[in-house]
């Protein structure tokens, strides 16, 4: 869990003022000093700050005699170093502490004040020791020394070219003084010792098989005391493991194991803590082996092989392997460049091969990171990387540059402090800072409003803009998944970091409010609430102890294991967070040996000490500042581990292997009974028998191996997956040890009849494994999600040569859902009920449907692409499982649409026929889902079927006012290639996207606000011309109306090179759609649902004007104007126009006409319930819309609840009329336009269309609704000019009827307005009279012709979609009408310019009350247009 | 007893940008305590009658307060305002610890609320954070803070108030939003405008936010040659001048081919609080006139936050960096400085390194009001030495020991940067429920 940060630093470790290549860098045992070896010199550096202490340059003689230096090895006490030269000689160096003089390179400020340092951090507190370096002696042996490795404080192991291993004492080395022959403790002749091949250790015949090569010798060697042997790589590229049967290494007691399968080893490295041996290979892979405890031999663990972003064989041999100091990470570099980090058991943490190096870097040929040597520095926060010698072709600058890079790392707090697995925060530690990523990744949302940014009140909540309202029930709280990228970076306070660098342990508490860190000595803690650090007030107390073994928070106390430098004792200490950090508030308990690891569970603290004793303490909180720690029992665990240091982590828990019947230990629940220990990656569970006081290590059971980290999910409320053990095993993925509960009912019965016994042979727990894509750092059990961190990189600049041409490494938090993987495993094992229980508990999660989809998808992909028949297909059971949830239909289709078509037959053979699923969608009114099924139908069924279903869906969509959906469906229907109709579809994918989620692109158009509409007339004009000249824009429509004779001419206009037959069917298609649309439009019009009509036209490109002009005498004709007006009011949720006579006096009435106040409306208490055109006229198909209406009627006062309504409904802003809890409306509030602005714009738009289509009836009603006298006068004038007596009569009658009903109802809104209309009525009367009988004849003519039209129209209306063909005559008539319409636009264009001027004075003449002043500019055009329309007619 | 609970909808962070909407759920509960003996039925019925709680009214309002130690030039105006606020009859305002500088219109939650024992009523309050208000800021001499005040009154008793603090981040106001390239795809611009086609309106805040994203995007790197009188020290490279909260300021330092060795350096991110001195009256009027010209936002509000726009930041940038390390001429007022984060490195052996200074999420971005100007800068201190070697020539053979002392000189350099607000949703600052008990 190491993650690189930033660019690598480039450092120069050469002699001052010189530049030289560094051959090897090596840190001493305590990682305080760094030795850097150049060809002819050795430099000793202080590790942090990186400052040179001493150099030693070899003499030219020595250089000539022994060759350049290659490698350096420290003696564990840091007093001596051994240098190995190219010629195989050893040079011994002595490092002496120079007591006189305080330090080195102490910075001295100049006298000038302005040049002095003034920041505290610039005064380095670190006291860098003064050391002197001298060459002691040089040692050569008879044969060339090829490898050196330090075994202990006293001994060295040398490998020679003569295939010997020499054990040499450091002290002897010193005495040798240039002697050729070194008195070795023992010389192990490797050719003499037995070598075994794995699996046959006891067979004598296996000895020396395969035999060692004649000239081979040990090329690389590493020793580990915990393994009790060495990993070795021979010069013939064979890998071996050398081990002695007891601690005395000599020829007779040594034996070796050939590492099987590794014939091309290049390097090796040993992990002490986990007892692993890693062998790098020429083939660029790394094989990792564990020690088999039973045989003492090697056991293959895993293989590291970079596969992503890498061409095979492009990496070259592995040239360096280094385990990090804590054994958590393995760094691997390759010959051809590249660095990667792997976790202990093989999860890839980082690889530079997947970094983004920019375009001009060829990773294959010239990798910028060609590394040769790696070395971890203190605590693994830095990695020294030595680059390879540049090839000859390189430019000079490259050669001059220093070859030492230093990459910074941060690591997870888990790596040092495994007890941190219990909390839900990601905490990473750098050398002097902490990275914290908090925050729920589930963000709660209320009332369906997503907490997006910027939240400026868009969408569904516009209605509540300026109101405080009462909520009837507590709002729905959902949650959405959020990704937080920002890391909170906490820098250590300077006065702590300056002397205690680096951070060793970091801990955060469960709530994420307190942090504690421990560096080299002492401790500091931080409160995220107050953003303050707390340090020891007394600095000597801070310096007096070293935290070791772990650090954790427990109920406001920070608990740690530590070593007191003052008393020289090992202790457990606790400090309260609230007090000053001081020993007088602290609590300490002495323990016998150094603490290695600790953990807590509830009130229990488990501590492992270096003497192999696990102690369990009970903690009790006495007050806010004091606690009590008592030892409950101790347990010797030496038997289960080689060395206590091999215990990676441990915890105590009440998790049990089996479920005891509830009654047996009622009190035992408090006391945790089970100890779980991770020994070298093996999870052991030690259970306490109920009869015994102390758990017995002999009863330890091994649950799993190769485990890096484990988590326990304890008491969780929401999730069914409680009491689980979670294990992460690197390359082997995640595993969960899950309790299997019998189904609830069964369980109860079982209690009664002793069913426990019946199934006692059944396992009560199950181990499920699944792969993970990220390295888990936190498992959020409640949210069934794992969180991890991933290494990312960005390229800052591609400037060649500068160091920032390398990518800048970043960290990103990632999350992964595991729910579906667990479910799948359970279903696979026929544990569907458990799976269902788990799924049920996770249903409220926002990604639950997604998880189901993933589940289905994985199984489908796997089974459908399987080469051989599957004996036990899982898909049916998975489908059955998903069917248990309401999102079934959606899941199937979503999954199908994300998989290849080739897999569909398999899916639907199991899931049911798409047709049936489609029908189910329709039944459950999931229209969008149904639409998604269409594309599947289209691919699996003949086009006829998909067409039929699409038409069916279109019908429903129209009725439910799903305009967006309808629009897409029309697009879909039009896109069906008619040639395909008869042939079944095979594998063609149509790119039509059906049913996209609402708010697709065309909605995001720019800046259409309400004012703009009034202000900018341009767009309106454009729209008008668009709608009237539509026939030229849309040839398809013309085709639909045209007869076959016209097709030849239209080929050109449509531009589609299609065959006539095909086009005719296409026309048929389109005609069908048009029929559906027209039928629906007619229904809407007949029910006066003008708003819906408007929406429909807008979304579906339905050409209202054209259609309306057909319908003038039919649906667009109004019989009862007053009622129409009333219905419109209802639909628009306006105050009723003709209220029954009430107590309202005239004054109030006037106010109402002035502006329909809201308070009055609600006081009047009800809407008119008379819906004359209710269910009677509506076809049964219109059910949904009726429902909607009823809903509106049921809440006459319409309390503004936060109600989510379908998008298209929300458009008119009628909230003003529903306001309840508002401040009393002020006067000026009432004085504004009586209609809501948006609504009025829409109505005006409709009015315009009706006028254009010559639908005078509706135009009149709308004008009255808008109280637009000017418009009425224009209409009247138009009618008069049209010289049709019939129309005039109707109009007159209508106006009269309206005024009559207005005066009948004294409270009418329109009373005032209607009064102004009297002149028009008079005018009409006059005109009718003047016309008299003269025009009777002509009138009759027109009326008959219109009757004809009406007849054919109704004929069409009632025809079914399919049998339109025989009705040729009707079509003919239509065609005639349409051709008239075709001609019209041209006329209009011609006349328009003229009329613009000529009608300029009309508004004034019309005697409008000038009530609509803002629209004055609009009037001339409207007027002219209307007149033209009349003329054409 | 009535309990009032207020909970912000944005539970994960009580942080809002200016112009965003604060949404708050307010719950009124009539609490009945268990201690009341469950006595005879008649008694409890009587008690019921008596215990029906009645609140006369409740209102909610958002205030921005200012607390300052500056002598206040606009005291009279504030007094005027408080007078005006006094008319809303909400005492809460006067109880507050500072002067109210921005107040939204109070919203009445209810009048005459009757609660049966155990009954709970929930109300939804929402209000836009004033677009032109200052951000939440806690400085040396001045503080700005926001609170939602929920006031209620029981019949015949005092007005009780509950305050919910929120943090406000400034989003710069864009003078002419139309000039900015519109962020949504515009290819359908030519389509006719049909009032029935609902289009999502792009709010000014969104535009500002996109603008802010543009401003804080990475541009071409800027290089700065650092040298003192003894020679070239190194080259500093900064990749962008404007940052959002929570981002890291990343720069690179190249000490290759230096003539003067840099031993160590520290980079501090500092916040400067510059008081804007009360001007002479005529001067002030002049200034206000000039400001009217270029800054639309500062016309109508008397205490206005105008966040330094990109242009202003650039100007600053030039003036400050062109000057030498130690200001020779009249030093620019540095105001009250607070160091937020520090990056310190000993770079004795370093040839190339990087500077990463994190900007914490809890600080206040660059802003300016009529009283205070808060700016950000990077403060560099380079400790240099001319001693490129150990003072003695490197030996042909044998030991070379580091000297005990190293004469050093320090040079200082300031580089202004601009800090902008981050998306409030990305800041994790869980808030609790605020409640008030009225006995």
Image: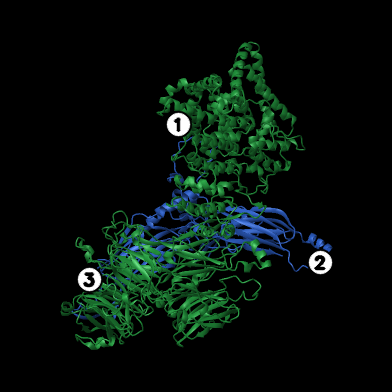
Q: Are marks 2 and 3 on the same chain?
A: no
Q: Looking at this view, is A602 or A144 the one in front?
A: A144
| Left or right relative to A1167: residue A1011 | left
Identify the hue of chain B.
blue
Q: Dot 1, how many residues are within 10 Å of its Cα: few (below 14), some (14-19), or many (20+)?
A: few
Whole-number angstrom distance, CA of label 1 to CA of label 2: 85 Å
Name the residue beneath numbered marker 3: A20
- In the displayed structure, A655 sits above or below A1125; it is below
Label 2 sits on a secondary structure element that is: loop
Res A191 quadrant in image: bottom left
Whole-number angstrom distance, CA of label 2 to CA of label 3: 95 Å
Label 3 sits on a secondary structure element that is: loop
Q: Residue at x 42, y 45 (%)?
A: B181
| Left or right relative to A832: residue A31 | left
Chain whose colour in the figure is green? A
- In the displayed structure, A192 sits above or below A1111; it is below
Whole-number angstrom distance, CA of label 3 to CA of label 1: 78 Å
Q: Position of residue A1175 (x, y in %)?
A: 69, 34
Indicate which label's residue lies in the foreground, 3 or 1: 1
- In the displayed structure, A464 sits above or below A42; it is above
Q: Is residue A1030 visible?
A: no
Q: Position of residue A748 (x, y in %)?
A: 67, 64
Q: Looking at this view, is B377 or A586 the one in front?
A: A586
Q: Dot 2, how many residues are within 10 Å of its Cα: few (below 14), some (14-19), or many (20+)?
A: few
Q: Is residue A657 visible?
A: yes
Q: Which mark is residue B39?
A: 2
Name the residue beneath numbered marker 1: A979
Q: Looking at this view, is A886 or B313 the one in front?
A: A886
Q: Position of residue B6 (x, y in %)?
A: 63, 60
Q: Residue at x 67, y 67 (%)?
A: A751
Quarter containing the N terminus of chain A: bottom left
């Amino acid at each position: 869990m190491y993650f690189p940060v930033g660019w690598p630093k480039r450092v120069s470790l050469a002699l001052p003022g010189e530049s030289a290549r560094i051959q090897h860098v090596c840190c001493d045992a305590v990682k305080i000093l760094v030795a850097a070896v150049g060809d002819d010199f050795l430099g000793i550096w202080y590790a942090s700050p990186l400052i040179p202490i001493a150099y030693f340059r070899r003499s030219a003689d020595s250089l000539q005699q022994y060759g350049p230096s290659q490698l350096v090895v420290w003696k564990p006490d840091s007093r001596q170093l051994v240098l190995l030269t190219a010629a195989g000689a050893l040079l011994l160096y002595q490092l002496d502490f120079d007591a006189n003089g305080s330090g080195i390179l102490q910075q001295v400020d100049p006298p000038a004040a302005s040049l002095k340092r003034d920041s505290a951090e610039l005064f380095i507190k670190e006291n860098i020791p003064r050391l002197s370096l001298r060459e002691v002696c040089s040692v050569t042996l008879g044969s060339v020394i090829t490898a050196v490795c330090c075994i202990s404080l006293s001994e060295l192991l040398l490998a020679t070219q003569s295939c010997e291993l020499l054990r040499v004492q450091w002290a002897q080395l010193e005495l040798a003084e240039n002697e050729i022959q070194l008195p070795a403790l023992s010389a192990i002749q490797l050719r003499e010792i037995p070598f075994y091949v794995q699996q046959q250790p006891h067979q004598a015949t296996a000895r020396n098989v395969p035999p060692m090569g004649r000239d081979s010798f040990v090329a690389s060697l590493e020793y580990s005391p915990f393994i009790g042997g060495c990993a070795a790589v021979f010069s013939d590229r064979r890998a071996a493991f050398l081990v002695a049967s007891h601690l005395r290494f000599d020829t007779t007691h040594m034996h070796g194991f050939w590492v099987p399968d590794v014939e091309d080893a290049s390097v090796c490295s040993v992990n002490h803590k986990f007892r692993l041996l890693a062998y790098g290979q020429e083939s660029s892979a790394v094989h990792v082996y564990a020690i088999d405890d039973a045989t003492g031999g090697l056991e293959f663990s895993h293989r590291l092989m970079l596969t992503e972003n890498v061409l095979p064989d492009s990496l070259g041999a592995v040239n360096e392997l280094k385990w990090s100091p804590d054994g958590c990470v393995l760094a691997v570099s390759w010959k051809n460049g590249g660095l990667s980090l792997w976790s202990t058991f093989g999860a890839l943490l980082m690889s530079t091969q997947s970094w983004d190096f920019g375009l001009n870097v060829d990773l294959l040929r010239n990798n910028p990171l060609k590394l040769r040597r790696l070395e971890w520095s203190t605590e693994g926060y830095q990695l020294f990387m030595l680059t390879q010698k540049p090839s000859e072709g390189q430019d000079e600058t490259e050669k001059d540059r220093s070859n030492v890079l230093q990459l910074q790392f941060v690591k997870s707090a888990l790596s040092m402090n495994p007890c941190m697995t219990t909390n839900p925060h990601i905490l990473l530690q750098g050398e002097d800072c902490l990275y914290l990523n908090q925050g729920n990744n589930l963000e709660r949302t209320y009332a369906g409003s997503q907490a997006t940014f910027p939240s400026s009140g868009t969408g569904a909540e516009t209605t509540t803009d300026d109101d405080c309202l009462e909520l009837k029930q507590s709002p729905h709280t959902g949650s959405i998944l959020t990704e937080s990228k920002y890391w909170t970076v906490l820098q250590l306070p300077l006065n702590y970091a300056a002397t205690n660098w680096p951070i060793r342990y970091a801990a955060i508490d469960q709530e994420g409010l307190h942090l504690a860190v421990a560096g080299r000595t002492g401790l500091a803690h931080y409160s995220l609430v107050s953003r303050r650090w707390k340090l020891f007030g007394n600095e000597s107390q801070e310096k007096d102890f070293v935290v070791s073994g772990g650090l954790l928070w427990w109920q406001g106390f920070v608990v740690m294991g530590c070593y007191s430098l003052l008393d020289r004792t090992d202790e457990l200490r606790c400090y309260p967070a609230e007090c000053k950090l001081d020993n007088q508030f602290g609590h300490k308990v002495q323990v016998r040996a150094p603490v290695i690891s600790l953990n807590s569970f509830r009130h229990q603290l488990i501590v492992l000490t270096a003497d192999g004793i696990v102690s369990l303490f009970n903690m009790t909180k006495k007050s806010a500042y004091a606690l009590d720690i008592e030892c409950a029992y101790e347990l010797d665990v030496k038997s289960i581990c080689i060395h206590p240091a091999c215990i990676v982590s441990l915890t105590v828990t009440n998790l049990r292997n089996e479920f005891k019947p509830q009654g047996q230990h009622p009190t035992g629940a408090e006391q945790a009974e089970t100890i779980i220990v991770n020994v070298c990656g093996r999870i052991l569970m030690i259970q306490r028998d109920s009869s015994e006081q102390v758990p017995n290590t002999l009863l330890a059971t091994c649950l799993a191996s190769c485990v890096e980290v484990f988590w326990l999910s304890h008491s969780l409320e929401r999730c069914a997956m409680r009491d689980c053990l979670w294990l992460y095993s690197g390359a082997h993925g995640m595993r969960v040890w899950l309790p299997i509960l019998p189904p609830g009912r069964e369980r109860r019965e079982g209690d009664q009849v002793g069913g426990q016994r019946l199934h006692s042979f059944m396992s009560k727990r199950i181990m499920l494994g699944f792969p993970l894509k990220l390295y888990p750092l936190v498992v959020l059990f409640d949210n069934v999600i794992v969180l991890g961190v991933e290494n990312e990189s960005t390229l800052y600049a591609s400037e060649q040569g500068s160091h920032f041409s390398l990518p800048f490494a970043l960290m990103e938090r990632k999350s992964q859902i595991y729910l579906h993987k667990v479910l799948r495993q359970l279903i696979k094992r026929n544990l569907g009920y458990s799976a269902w229980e788990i799924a049920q508990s996770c249903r409220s999660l926002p990604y639950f449907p997604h998880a189901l989809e993933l589940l289905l998808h994985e199984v489908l992909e796997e089974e459908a692409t399987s080469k051989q028949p599957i004996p036990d297909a899982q898909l049916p059971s998975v489908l059955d499982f998903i069917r248990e949830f309401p999102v079934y239909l959606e899941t199937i289709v979503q999954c199908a649409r994300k998989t290849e078509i080739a897999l569909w037959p398999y899916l639907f053979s199991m899931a049911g026929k798409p047709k049936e699923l489609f029908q189910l969608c329709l039944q459950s009114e999931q229209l969008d889902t149904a639409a998604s099924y269409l594309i599947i139908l289209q691919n699996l069924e003949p086009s006829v079927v998909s067409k039929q279903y699409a038409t069916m869906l279109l019908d429903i969509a129209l009725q439910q006012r799903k305009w967006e959906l309808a629009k897409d469906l029309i697009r879909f229907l039009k896109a069906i290639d008619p040639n395909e109709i008869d042939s079944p579809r095979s594998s063609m994918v149509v790119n039509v996207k059906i049913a996209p989620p609402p708010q697709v692109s065309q909605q995001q158009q720019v800046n259409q606000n309400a004012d703009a509409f009034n202000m900018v007339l341009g767009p309106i004009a454009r729209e008008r011309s668009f709608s009237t000249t539509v026939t030229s824009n849309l040839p398809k429509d013309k085709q639909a109306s045209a007869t076959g004779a016209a097709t030849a001419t239209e080929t050109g206009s449509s531009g589609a090179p299609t065959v006539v037959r095909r086009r005719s069917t296409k026309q048929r298609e389109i005609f069908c759609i048009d029929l559906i649309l027209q039928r629906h439009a007619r229904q809407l019009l007949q029910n006066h649902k003008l708003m819906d009509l408007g929406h429909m036209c807008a979304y579906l490109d339905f050409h209202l004007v054209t259609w309306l002009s057909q319908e003038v005498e039919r649906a667009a004709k109004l019989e009862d104007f007053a009622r129409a007006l009333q219905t419109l009011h209802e639909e628009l949720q306006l105050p009723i126009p003709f209220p029954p006579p009430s107590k309202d006096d005239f004054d109030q009435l006037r106010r109402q006409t002035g502006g329909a106040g809201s308070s009055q409306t609600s006081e009047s208490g009800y809407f008119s319930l008379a819906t004359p055109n209710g269910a009677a006229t509506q076809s049964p198909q219109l059910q949904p819309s009726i429902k909607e209406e009823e809903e509106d009627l049921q809440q006459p006062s319409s309390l503004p609840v936060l109600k989510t309504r379908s998008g298209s409904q929300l458009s008119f802003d009628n909230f003003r009329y529903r306001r309840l809890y508002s401040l009393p409306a002020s006067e000026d509030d009432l004085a504004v336009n009586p209609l809501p602005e948006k609504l009025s714009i829409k109505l005006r738009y409709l009015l315009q269309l009706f006028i254009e289509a010559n639908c005078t009836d509706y135009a009149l009603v709308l004008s009255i609704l808008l109280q637009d006298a000017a418009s009425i006068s224009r209409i009247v004038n138009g009618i008069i000019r049209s010289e049709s007596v019939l129309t005039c009569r109707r109009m007159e009658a209508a106006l009269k009827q309206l005024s009559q009903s207005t005066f009948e109802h004294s409270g009418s809104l329109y009373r005032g307005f209607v009064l102004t209309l009297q002149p028009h009525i008079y005018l009409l009367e006059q005109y009718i009279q003047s016309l008299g009988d003269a025009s009777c004849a002509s009138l009759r003519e027109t009326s008959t012709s219109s009757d004809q039209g009406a007849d054919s129209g109704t004929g069409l209306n009632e025809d079914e979609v399919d049998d339109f063909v025989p009705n040729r005559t009707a079509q003919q008539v239509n065609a005639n009408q349409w051709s008239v319409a075709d001609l019209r636009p041209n006329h209009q264009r011609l006349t328009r310019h003229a009329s613009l001027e000529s009608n300029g004075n009309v508004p004034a003449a019309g005697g409008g009350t000038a009530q609509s002043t803002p629209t004055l500019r609009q009037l001339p055009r409207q007027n002219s247009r209307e007149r033209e329309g009349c003329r054409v007619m | 007893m009535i309990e009032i609970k207020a909970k912000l909808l944005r539970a994960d962070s009580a942080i809002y940008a200016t112009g965003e909407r604060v949404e708050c759920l307010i719950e009124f509960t009539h609490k009945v305590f268990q201690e009341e003996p469950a006595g005879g039925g008649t008694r409890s019925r009587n008690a019921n009658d008596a215990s029906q709680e009645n609140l006369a009214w409740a209102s909610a309002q958002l205030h921005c307060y200012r607390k300052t130690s500056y002598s206040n030039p606009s005291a009279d105006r504030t007094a005027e305002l408080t007078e005006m606020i006094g008319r809303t009859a909400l005492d809460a305002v006067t109880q507050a610890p500072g002067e109210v500088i921005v107040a939204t219109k109070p919203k009445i939650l209810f009048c005459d609320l009757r609660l049966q024992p155990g009954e709970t009523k929930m109300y939804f309050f929402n209000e836009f954070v004033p677009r032109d208000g200052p951000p939440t800021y806690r400085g040396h001499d001045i503080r700005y803070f926001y609170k939602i005040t929920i006031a209620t009154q029981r019949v015949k008793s005092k007005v009780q108030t509950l305050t919910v603090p929120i943090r406000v981040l400034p989003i710069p106001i864009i003078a002419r939003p139309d000039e900015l390239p519109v962020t949504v795809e515009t290819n359908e611009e030519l389509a006719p405008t049909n009032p029935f086609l609902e289009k999502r309106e792009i709010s000014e805040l969104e535009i500002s936010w996109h603008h802010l994203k543009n401003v804080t995007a990475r541009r071409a790197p800027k290089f700065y040659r650092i040298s003192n009188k003894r020679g070239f020290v190194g080259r500093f490279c900064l990749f962008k001048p404007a940052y959002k909260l929570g981002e890291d300021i990343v720069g690179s330092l190249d000490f290759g081919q230096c003539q003067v060795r840099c031993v160590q350096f520290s980079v501090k991110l500092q916040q400067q609080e510059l008081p804007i001195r009360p001007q002479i009256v005529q001067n002030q009027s002049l200034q206000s006139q000039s400001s009217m010209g270029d800054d639309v936002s500062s016309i109508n509000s008397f205490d206005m936050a105008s966040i330094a726009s990109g242009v202003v930041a650039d100007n600053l940038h030039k003036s400050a960096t062109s000057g030498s390390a130690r200001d020779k001429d009249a030093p620019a007022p540095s105001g009250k400085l607070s160091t937020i984060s520090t990056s310190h490195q000993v770079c004795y052996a370093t040839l190339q390194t990087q500077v990463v200074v994190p900007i914490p999420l809890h600080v206040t971005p660059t802003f300016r009001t009529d009283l205070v100007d808060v700016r950000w800068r990077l403060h560099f201190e380079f400790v240099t030495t001319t001693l490129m070697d150990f003072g003695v020539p490197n030996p042909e053979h044998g030991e070379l020991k580091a000297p005990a002392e190293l004469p050093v000189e320090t040079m200082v350099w300031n580089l202004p940067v601009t800090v902008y607000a981050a998306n409030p949703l990305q800041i994790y600052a869980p808030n609790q429920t605020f409640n008030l008990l009225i006995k």
